[in-house]
Image (cartoon, rainbow, N blue to C red):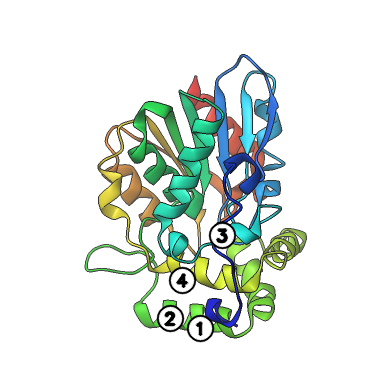
Amino acid sequence: MTISDVDIAPAASSGDPLLRNNVTVSGSTIGPTVMFAHGFGCSQETWNLVAPHFEADHRVVVFDHVGAGNSDWDAYDRAKYDSLEGYAADVVEIVEALDATEVIFVGHSVGAIIGVLAANRAPERFRALVLVSPSPCYLNDGEYLGGFENADLEALIESLEANYLGWSQQTAPVIMGQPERPELGERLTDSFCRVDPAIASHFARVTFLSDNRADLARVTVPTLVLQTREDAIAPPPVGRYVHTAIPASQYVELDTSGHVPILSAPDQVVRGIREFLS
């Protein structure tokens, strides 16, 4: 199934970004705001092992990208979300609706790149970025090793579009990268299977075929890159590239493998963020 096979209404009901993106606010009412953004095929629940650790001294904000979790799926507008800039615009609208400044944005996977774009759009709203397993470009390009050749990416996307549920069951454990802990692969599979297949197919094409390398140099806020030692989706050279391309960023390699350390090693992610903020 592809995005064109279903009738997805334009964003007629998206007037309130807090409702549109199912925004949840918890934690301290006086502490700085830390905002968590999930990656492809996930929802705000992916942060359940990380976000609560910041509630004692931060206002914690989690949300669902449109088409994921309990967001307003009727707000999905293919034209708007034909670029990651559409998702970045949502992030800025959420921050503005919360009247938040000095936001610490923590994004996982494509959520990290969406955070880069949001911070570049409204740098006055953001204090810092934490990029967990980011990739600005998945395609190999000369000396840049994104991890995939064009034919490989096209095959991956076509497989996803043809049978999203089957693709999820096969691919989620590979993405998780924790074969000795199959329950984590099952958890990610379950998350993938709760996303609208048509929207997920379009989001995958936008995610995997985007090239946001040029946006990294425009980042003006302190940035931390958290990278695992092995990652089938965004390998370590990609994380190091992001670190090199963002001025004055910090790079930390976590002692775990896989693309989703927020599930496989949440304690290390929490510690990395805490040390960065301190």
Is disc 1 surrounded by few (<14), some (14 to 19) or many (20+) residues within 10 Å? Answer: some
Q: Which mark is residue 193?
A: none
Three-letter amino acid code of the residue under disc 3:
Phe
Query: Element type at marker 2?
Result: helix
Upstream in sequence: badge 2 or badge 4: 2
Closer to the camera in the image, 64 or 207: 64
Please give left or right for residue 55 compared with residue 156 in the image: right
Three-letter amino acid code of the residue under disc 2:
Glu
User: How far apart are the alpha carbons under marks 4 and 3?
Assistant: 11 Å
The quarter of the image holding the N terminus is: bottom right
User: How far apart are the alpha carbons under marks 3 and 2?
Assistant: 17 Å
Q: Which mark is residue 158?
A: 1
Upstream in sequence: badge 4 or badge 3: 3
Residue corresponding to mark 4: 205
**In the displayed structure, would residue 159 be above or below residue 133?**
below
Residue corresponding to mark 3: 40
Q: Residue at x 62, y 34 (%)?
A: 61
Q: Residue at x 63, y 29 (%)?
A: 60
**In the displayed structure, would residue 38 be above or below residue 202?**
above
Upstream in sequence: badge 1 or badge 3: 3
User: How far apart are the alpha carbons under marks 1 and 3?
Assistant: 16 Å
Please give left or right for residue 137 compared with residue 232 in the image: left
Q: Residue furthest front?
A: 12
